[in-house]
Amino acid sequence: MPANILVDYTRPFSTLWLKRCADNLLRARGLQQKELNVLLTDNPTIEQFNRRWFNRPWPTNVISFPMDDMDCLGDVVISIDRAREEAQQGLTTLSNRLVELLVHGFVHLLGEDHERGPEDALRMGHMEFELKKTLFRRNIMADLCINVDHVATIRQARGGVEPEPVVAAGMVELAGADGVVVHLREDRRHIQDRDVRLIKEIVQTRLTLEMAATDEMISIASDIRPDIVTLVPEKRQELTTEGGLDVAGLERSVTDAVSRLHDAGIPVSLFIDAEKEQIEAAKRTGAECIEIHTGRYADARDEKTRDREFDKIAEMARLATDLGLRVHAGHGLNYQNTGRLAAVSEIVEFSIGHSVISRSVFVGLERAVKEMLSIIKG
Ligand code: PXP
């Protein structure tokens, strides 16, 4: 049974990652048949729970309510306010802190209690450590999110109504993709504003909106509220996104964009080159995620260069994961070069567009998506 995430908070709050983590926690313990309820709330509400059930009149960070039930493991209540304070004190992101609190609450539901004594505290700490390792390092398969921009490119070639990218979004989901990606470019060369709105309405997995960090785009994103925004650099003359965002050089403005998107309840990923300096800067901006630009690996003309670019991606994915960032990858990936990257366990999501949409012309969209899924999850 999938985990239920409920939000009772003053502002909109994306539950995407916590849901994924909660489902994976159940799976990691072989408890996927059980129900798990997670309530995200604020300090006044958790204080009421703490006072009423434990006679402790202060806002705590997490409370677990185990359920003595065949079908339900129990409820975990987490204060977003406390998690935010603790994230700032512990120099981590809000998402990471929420995941840590979820793991803590989950282990309580399993019957562990650190307050029983030092041995119990040690055992509980060890269990939490192992579960976090599973979640952050992942021994589950990476997700595949399909970029449907090029369906819109064909539509725009005639300025008409077909093919419809909104239909493509539904079809890629039906074929098993884990999410849909669109890039709303400032020049609107393919995806249009209405496409983003309609796709957001219909997706049942998740929608990633790629965009430049401009006022216009931040305002559109805050209004439509995709599940995640990926900030990319944009030049009008380029054919496609060339090179990653220079987060190290633009740290102040990127940090500002990240925090404005966070204020709208939207998690943020930064599309960057596989470089230490960029990853460290990305971490400082408060973004939850990076997407490693795989273009240089994909475009390598000889094996030696490809090997070198691959090693760089794998090493930087490890570094980013160690810093607590989630790692996505994309650009130029196709049916030949994706398999090798799929073995890099720190990469938890692939964003692929052009090769899948191109193949769909010959084999159909469903088959094109399924073939890519089998490379990534196979
Ligand atoms: N990720 C980002 C940030 C991109 O800008 C693009 C291209 O729109 C992709 C992934 C997908 O690249 P491709 O179309 O080459 O698969």
Image: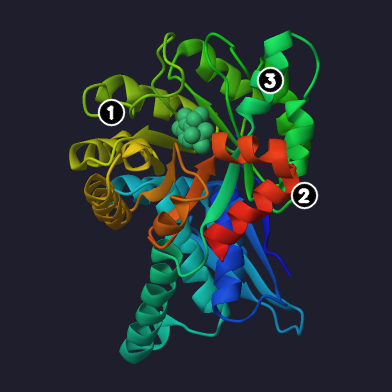
Q: Which numbered dot is residue 154?
A: 3
The quarter holding residue 183 reads: top right
Few, some or many residues within 10 Å of mark 1 (<14, 14–19, 20+): many
Alpha-carbon span between mark 3 and mark 1: 32 Å
Residue type at tag 1: Val
Spatial separation of the CA atoms under disc 2 and disc 1: 36 Å
At label 3, which amino acid type do we have?
Answer: Ile
Task: Mark 2 vs mark 1: give the one in front.
Answer: 2
Where residue 331 appears, as percent x and y from the top left, is 44, 37
x, y percentage for residue 122?
32, 84
Q: Nearer the viewer, residue 81 or 250?
A: 250
The residue pinned by badge 2 equals: 174
Q: Is residue 318 left or right of residue 353?
A: left
Q: Position of residue 227 (x, y in %)?
A: 60, 38
The mark that comes first in sequence, 2 or 1, is: 2
Q: Is residue 283 visible?
A: yes
Q: Residue at x 26, y 21 (%)?
A: 250
Q: Nearer the viewer, residue 349 or 24?
A: 349
Q: Which residue is mark 1?
A: 247
Report the mark closest to the observer, 3 or 1: 3
SS at circle 2? helix
Q: Nearer the viewer, residue 189 or 10?
A: 189
